[in-house]
Image (spheres, rainbow, N blue to C red):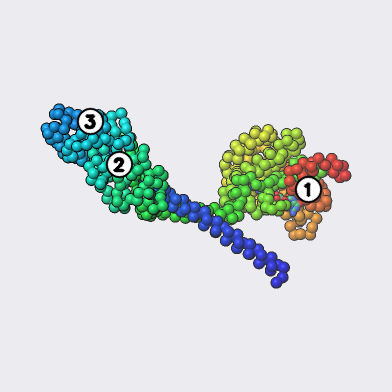
């Protein structure tokens, strides 16, 4: 394999690697919304789960408060009894109170606050029966959450007492809530004692207590617990739900959010592809370069042929690629013209000229810089306004900026006449570029008032040669003289051409003989060295 083949193979491998990387990058970026929507779906499912479980827990709490209020009401009615405590009449009244209160299992009368005297169902106590320490004591009520098996049934009761009476409640009634989902569980925990007061059979006590402490967390039994505390009583309701339910909700949410993610991902991928495609096309790159002000202007000196003194420069746009590699304007200017980029390009060149040359043109009233306009720039007065504004902003006199227009610029002749007139009235010189190469003959010169003719390089090239077209150059010069217009010869490369032009009365020249287009700083240096150079002429 020879070296060139090897280079080509390497280049194609590099190209392929870039394509693969770009595709992988696009896929990676496009999957972000999918991942994001999956996450959103999970969060939504969690919120739904949390809300549903909190609702169950609050329903449990409402139930407890209902039972508690029922007990308080029974205690209140016991206060109203007027018969001798524990008399037959009193016992009958007590039974009535007990029966009338749905959740109350029994009512008991107390002596000296702590001793049981008699109960509606239990009858009179034969022995001194003293109450133990309550689980919680409020200003009006005492509560025994658990373990007070007063009726000796083997089933601890919940007891609520004031100073004279107590009511016994079945703890199971606290969690007697109907729910549609059999996988849910409901438990009641004493907040002061951290003990389970009542719970459904499907709940596992050790996990309930952990779940109570770590509300909103999934426990090791695979159940997700939520705790809601009562504002009135020292108890909390713990609602539990297997986290598999969460998965179910997540799947449901995914059905909504995943398509959104996929559509978004596809839209992003398509957008990225379009962006990359447009960026990688030449027009896209040019658009980007103009927007990013990545173009540069080079300056080619225009000299007085007799004295060789520089009288100005033509601003020639350049598109830098790699180090020292410039795309020539004849490649990208037509591209800009065909893709609505030429106006931004002209504006940018004007801006760059101002930036590069403002100081020079403020100091040297004997110099000017000419700027090339495209046909479209002469079709409206937009550019006149831009020119005025830009020059005012950088304090450059209109006389210091000349305008170069080609015959192509006179396509919209009527408007162009007005624009050229306006430019001249503003104080700008108007130069006709590539003079002699157009097809419209010279008739337009009768319509357009211009200042200078730039004789095209193709005519200068024939000067002093045997070419068949060599006789055209003198005619072109003759026309310039007869119209009393100043002339600049373009593309002067030899002393012989320069001598011929002087002999034929052409005042100015531009070409490699005097200087190639150069960056701004090089042009400033060129001017600084001018005195030294012209001395030898
Ligand atoms: N071989 C040779 N060439 C010489 C010599 N002297 C000057 N040239 C080249 O001839 C072209 C003169 O510019 P142009 O006729 O206005 O022709 C310009 C102009 O029509 C257009 N152009 C350049 N800058 C701009 C711009 O900012 N806006 C617009 N609309 N067109 C531009 O691109 C054309 C080509 O520009 P460049 O490539 O810079 O080519 C320049 C210059 O580098 C010489 O002695 N020998």
Ligand 1 under 8 Å from disc 3 Cβ: no
Using the image, determine if residue 107 lies above or below residue 517.
above
In which image quadrant can residue 356 be found?
top right
Q: Which residue is depicted at the point 63% across and 43% down?
A: 348
Q: Secondary structure at mark 3?
A: strand
Q: Which mark is residue 111?
A: 3
Q: Earlier in the sequence, mark 3 or mark 1?
A: 3
Residue under label 2, please give it. Answer: 146
Residue under label 1, please give it. Answer: 515
Q: Position of residue 517 (x, y in %)?
A: 74, 48
Q: Who is closer to the viewer here, 343 or 70? A: 70
Q: Which residue is depicted at the point 22% across and 32% down?
A: 110
Is residue 59 visible to us here? no
Q: Earlier in the sequence, mark 3 or mark 2?
A: 3
Q: Position of residue 422 (x, y in %)?
A: 62, 37
Q: Nearer the viewer, mark 3 or mark 2?
A: 3
Query: Crowding at label 3, few (<14), some or many (≥20) Cα neighbours within 10 Å?
Result: some
Q: Earlier in the sequence, mark 1 or mark 2?
A: 2
């Amino acid at each position: 394999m020879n070296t060139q083949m090897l280079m080509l193979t390497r280049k194609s491998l590099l190209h392929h690697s870039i394509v693969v990387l770009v595709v992988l990058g696009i896929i990676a970026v496009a999957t972000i919304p999918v991942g994001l929507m999956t996450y959103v779906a999970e969060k939504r499912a969690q919120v739904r789960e949390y809300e549903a479980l909190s609702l169950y827990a609050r329903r449990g709490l409402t139930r407890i408060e209902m039972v508690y209020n029922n007990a308080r009401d029974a205690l209140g009615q016991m206060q109203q009894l007027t018969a001798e405590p524990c008399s037959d009449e009193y016992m009958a009244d007590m039974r009535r109170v007990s029966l009338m209160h749905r959740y109350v299992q029994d009512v008991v009368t107390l002596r000296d606050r702590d001793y049981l005297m008699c109960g509606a169902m239990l009858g009179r106590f034969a022995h001194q029966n003293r109450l133990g320490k309550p689980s919680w004591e409020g200003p009006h009520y005492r509560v025994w959450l658990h373990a007070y098996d007063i009726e000796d049934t083997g089933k601890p009761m919940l007891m609520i007492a004031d100073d004279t009476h107590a009511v016994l409640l079945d703890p199971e009634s606290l969690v007697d809530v109907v729910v549609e989902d059999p996988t849910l569980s409901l438990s009641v925990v004493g907040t002061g004692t951290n003990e389970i007061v009542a719970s459904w059979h499907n709940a596992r006590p050790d996990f309930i207590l952990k779940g109570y402490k770590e509300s909103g967390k999934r426990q090791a039994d695979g159940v997700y617990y939520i705790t809601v505390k009562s504002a009135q009583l020292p108890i909390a309701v713990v609602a539990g739900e297997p986290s598999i339910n969460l998965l179910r909700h997540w799947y449901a949410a995914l059905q909504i959010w995943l398509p959104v993610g996929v559509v978004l991902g596809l839209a992003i991928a398509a957008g990225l592809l379009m962006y990359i495609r447009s960026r990688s096309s030449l027009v896209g790159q040019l658009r980007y370069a103009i927007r990013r002000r990545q173009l540069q202007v080079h300056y080619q000196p225009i000299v007085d042929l007799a004295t060789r003194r520089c009288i100005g420069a033509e601003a020639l746009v350049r598109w830098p690629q790699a180090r020292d590699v410039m795309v020539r304007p004849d490649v990208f200017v037509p591209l800009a013209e065909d893709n609505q980029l030429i106006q931004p390009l002209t504006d940018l060149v004007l801006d760059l000229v101002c930036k590069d040359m403002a100081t020079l043109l403020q100091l040297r009233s004997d110099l000017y810089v000419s700027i090339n306009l495209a046909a479209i720039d002469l079709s409206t007065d937009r550019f006149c306004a831009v020119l005025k504004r830009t020059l005012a902003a950088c304090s450059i006199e209109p006389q210091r900026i000349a305008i170069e227009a080609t015959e192509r610029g006179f396509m919209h002749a009527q408007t162009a006449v007005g624009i050229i007139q306006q430019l001249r009235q503003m104080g700008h010189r108007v130069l006709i570029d590539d003079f002699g190469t157009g097809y419209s003959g010279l008739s337009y010169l009768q319509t357009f008032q211009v200042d200078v003719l730039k004789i095209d390089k193709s005519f200068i090239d024939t000067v002093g040669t045997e070419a068949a077209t060599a006789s055209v150059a003198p005619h072109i010069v003759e026309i310039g003289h007869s119209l009393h217009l100043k002339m600049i010869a373009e593309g002067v490369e030899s002393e012989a051409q320069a001598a011929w032009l002087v002999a034929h009365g052409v005042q100015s020249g531009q070409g490699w003989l005097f200087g190639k287009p150069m960056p701004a700083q090089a042009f400033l240096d060129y001017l600084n060295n001018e005195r030294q150079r012209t001395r030898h002429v």
